[in-house]
Image (tube, rainbow, N blue to C red):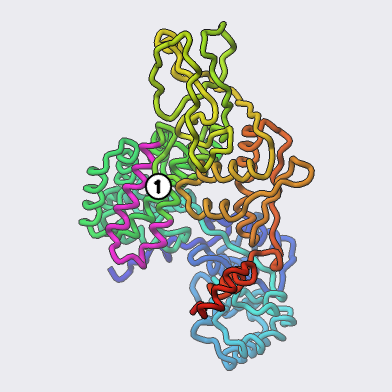
Amino acid sequence: MSNYIVSARKYRPVTFDSVVGQSALTTTLKNSIQSGRLAHAYLFCGPRGVGKTTCARIFAKTINCLNPRPNGDACEECESCKAFNEQRSYNIHELDAASNNSVEDIRQLIEQVNIPPQVGRYKVFIVDEVHMLSTAAFNAFLKTLEEPPAHAIFILATTEKHKLLPTILSRCQIYDFNRMTVQDIVGHLENVARQEGITYEPAALNVIAQKADGGMRDALSIFDQVASFCQGNITYQQTIADLNVLDHDYYFKLVDYFLDGKIPEIMLTFDEILSKGFEGSHFVAGLNNHLRNLLVSRDAATVKLLETSDEVRQRYSQQAQRCQPLFLYAAIRKCTDCDLNYRVSQNKRLLVELTLIEITQMATGEADGNPSGLGPTENSLTHSGNKKLKPVFQPTEAAPSQPQPAAPATPQVQSAAPAQPRPSQPNSAPQPAPQPSPAVASKSFSIHSTGQKPATQGKTIQAEPAEKAATVPSEAPAQAPQSSQPLNQENIIIAWRQLAHNLFANDSAMLNRMEQNMPELQADQTTLLVSADNPLVAELLQRHAPQLQKQLQDTFAQPAIRINISVRTPEERPQHLTSRQQFEKMREENDALQRLCEEFTLDVE
């Protein structure tokens, strides 16, 4: 029991070739040793547990080896190597800057620098956590770090390079250590398990590697913990139980419930997760990561971004084929919003449950091309298939009262309510056309939403006989409708407002922006200028400008229409007047109001 050594120390690399996940850096260091091009100061920086101090020790031992091997590694047999392995070498000094960060500590270090090595060629000073030095200690260290004796080499290690002074950085060769990948960690853990005689499941080691977050030292520490819990047989179920990790089977099951619209099962599953002691924020973060993995699994080019076992990767690929990209995008946004709002929410459970219900509505609406809960941007502009919206204006030519020869199919105009057939009267006078509403009485075109057929106004359309109507298809083939409406400022305003309500009925913010920023027809009769109050609004309008431009081109049958977005100057922006200012302006423009105020002594408080 007393001789037990943790895996992080027992299996610490002793050669450059045994360092995991840093092949580029170790190759550079080996080549510099073989060529004799050694700098006087190095800076090793990177996340915790990725091999900074380990590489510094290997580098210090190798440059002092008396009989280096042809591949550049230390011989492990000379007096210098033995002294290093037995931790009695006087040529290698390690300083913990976290606890020795004063000017006095640096002065003692500088005194040791002046003493030449007794065995070997170099004295190596490894300063760990160098960012913890005080500013005065850094300044005291500058001169020695810039021009040390020929036998002195400094290796500084830190996890926070941004905290170092620029004068320190400029004096060092900087080596940035990478965070280790899940595959590298799993491979090293498999090697350790074989040497320790421990059986394991690949999925369990994958969970350990993901929990380590790119640090090998953390992975080995977790491995020792799980090995003790499992008593030499590391299984997936025991690993997630020991590490309090939520099983990915829950996420696969939830996504299936999303796609099938099973809200009761979703609520019960979430309740089961909470009953096991998992926090709602932890669950939402895991679900968000699961949706992200499904997204990258849809494409063979991005599947390499999925860091998991082959078995789980296959499950991701199978489930990803059932999910539309639009649904995954929207679901990820919902989970992200829930994660951001979780801390400030007064009812955290209800917030998560509402998010799950909204995601289910998105999934079930995907089959109809209209995912519920999606904003107009996703539904109208970026939905797969890119369905075109119906134009605002429709042809309003009167239908003939007598049967006519068959003509090419054209888009049929129907009223909002089904028309009742009228009995034919040979000598009857033509029936008057239905009167339009006051809002559009002067217009010969109609305005309608994209989900309904337009109602005709200003023209008389007689119903066809029942026999003929029965032979007419329910939906005519889609054709690009032509409009005879003139392109003028008044028609453009009406079309612009209708497009705003068609596209952004569920996005009140964007609807208000379009209502407040009307286009102006320019002198060339083809350019529409939209002036925004600020660059942010201009950017949002510019994002939807191609879709709006295409709809207006189809509406007026003029492909030359172009939309330009500009930003108003402060002088051009409309002034918001107070109640008194509005009243005073009205008095100036209306003499009758002025006389009324003077006679009755009226004022605005």
Q: Residues within 10 Å of mark 1 (few under 14, many from 20)?
A: some
For this orientation, the residue located farthest to the right is 524
- Tell me, yes or no, if residue 83 can be seen here: no
What's drawn in magenta, residue-wise? 337-365
The image position of residue 262, as x and y in percent, is 27, 39
Mark 1 sits on what residue?
A: 290
In the picture, measured across the screen, residue 562 lies left or right of residue 346, that is right
- Tell me, yes or no, if residue 551 can be seen here: yes
Amino acid under disc 1: His
Q: How many marks?
A: 1
Whether residue 344 is in magenta: the answer is: yes
* Residue depicted at 41% across the width and 32% down the height: 368
Q: Nearer the viewer, residue 372 or 321?
A: 372
* Residue depicted at 31% across the width and 59% down the height: 280
The image position of residue 436, as x and y in percent, is 50, 35
* Residue depicted at 50% across the width and 26% down the height: 433
Q: Nearer the viewer, residue 410 or 326?
A: 410
For this orientation, the residue located farthest to the front is 599
* Residue depicted at 44% across the width and 45% down the height: 374
Whether residue 27 is in magenta: the answer is: no
The image position of residue 345, as x and y in percent, is 33, 65
Q: Nearer the viewer, residue 587 or 204?
A: 587
Q: Main secondary structure of the magenta part?
A: helix
In the picture, measured across the screen, residue 318 lies left or right of residue 155, that is left
Q: Secondary structure at mark 1?
A: helix
The image position of residue 24, as x and y in percent, is 63, 55
